[in-house]
Image (spheres, coloured by chain):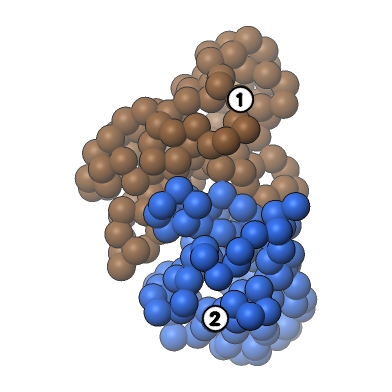
Chain colours: A brown, B blue
Amino acid sequence: DIQMTQSPSSLSASVGDRVTITCQASQDISNYLNWYQQKPGKAPKLLIYDASNLETGVPSRFSGSGSGTYFTFTITSLQPEDIATYYCQQYANLLRGITFGPGTKVDIK
Amino acid sequence: EVQLVESGGGLVQPGGSLRLSCAASGFTFSTYSMNWVRQAPGKGLEWVSYISTISSTIYYADSVKGRFTISRDNAKNSLYLQMNSLRAEDTAVYYCARSGEHGDYGAFDIWGQGTMVIVSS
C-alpha cells in the first residue's frame, strides 16, 4: 500500500493568515493527489484534484501544488468558514488501493 | 440537483450482515464510477471499494476483501455494499462517492450524507 503522511496534524491560525499543509507519499504518485475539506458532521468536499486543479465553485484562496512524493495545500487568507479537517488522498494505482492522509485539523486562533 | 442518498445502516451483531444502498439522482449515474468510503467515529477517512461504470472493474481495500461486495444497478441508479462477517472495527459512517468527473477514477466530487453502521453485541 501507498502510505500518506500529513503535517501538521493540527494548527491554529488567525483570520487572514496564510496556512500551508504538507502531504507526503511513501512512493512516487506523480500528480494523482486530491485535497478534501470536511466540516464536523458533514461529508467531505473535494477542493483540489490532480494536485493543483481547483474544483468548480471552490474559492481561489485554496490552492495545491507538488508532484512525485511531496505536496502542499495552501489557504492564502484563512476565513472563519475554513475551520475544518483537511485530507489529502492518493489514487496512483487502484490495484494498490486509494489512501487518505490522516488529516489536518484547522482552527481559528 | 446532483445528489447521493445512502440508506441501510444500523446496529448489527458481530458476524452479522448488512446491505447498504446509495440512490443517485440529478446526473447520468451509468457514466460515473462509484466508491464507498468509511469513517470510524473520531477517525479519518478510509476508502472501502470502487466499481466502474459497467461493473467490469471492482477493487476493495484489504481490510474488507472477501467480506464486502460492491455492486450497482444502472437501471435503478443505485449503488450497493453487501457487508458480511461484520466486525467491531467495521463500525463507521459509510459514504458513497462519485468519481470520474475529471476523467479519472480518483477524485470523489459528489458524496452522500453517510449512513452509520454499528457492529456491537
Report whether B83 appears left or right of A7: right
Disc 1 target residue: A59
Given residues A94 and B102, the one toward you in this image is B102
Task: Name the chain letter of the residue that bears numbered label 2.
Answer: B
Q: Residue at x 53, y 15 (%)?
A: A76
Q: Residue at x 47, y 25 (%)?
A: A63
> Residue type at mark 2?
Ser
Q: Quadrant of the N terminus of chain A?
A: bottom left
* Image position, residue A40 (x, y; %): 72, 43
* Image position, residue A3 (x, y; %): 34, 51
Given residues B20 and B119, the one toward you in this image is B20
* Vertical comparison of A95 with A52: above or below: below
* Image position, residue A51 (x, y; %): 38, 36
> Residue type at mark 1?
Pro
Disc 2 target residue: B71
* Vertical comparison of A106 with B29: above or below: above
Q: Residue at x 60, y 39 (%)?
A: A37
* Vertical comparison of A79 with A99: above or below: above
Q: Quadrant of the C terminus of chain A?
A: top right
Task: Name the chain letter of the residue that bears numbered label 1.
Answer: A
Element at label 2: strand
Element at label 1: loop
Place residue A85 in its image quadrant.
Answer: top right
- Graded by Cα atoms within 10 Å as few (under 14), some (14 to 19) or many (20 or more), the crowding at tag 1 reads few
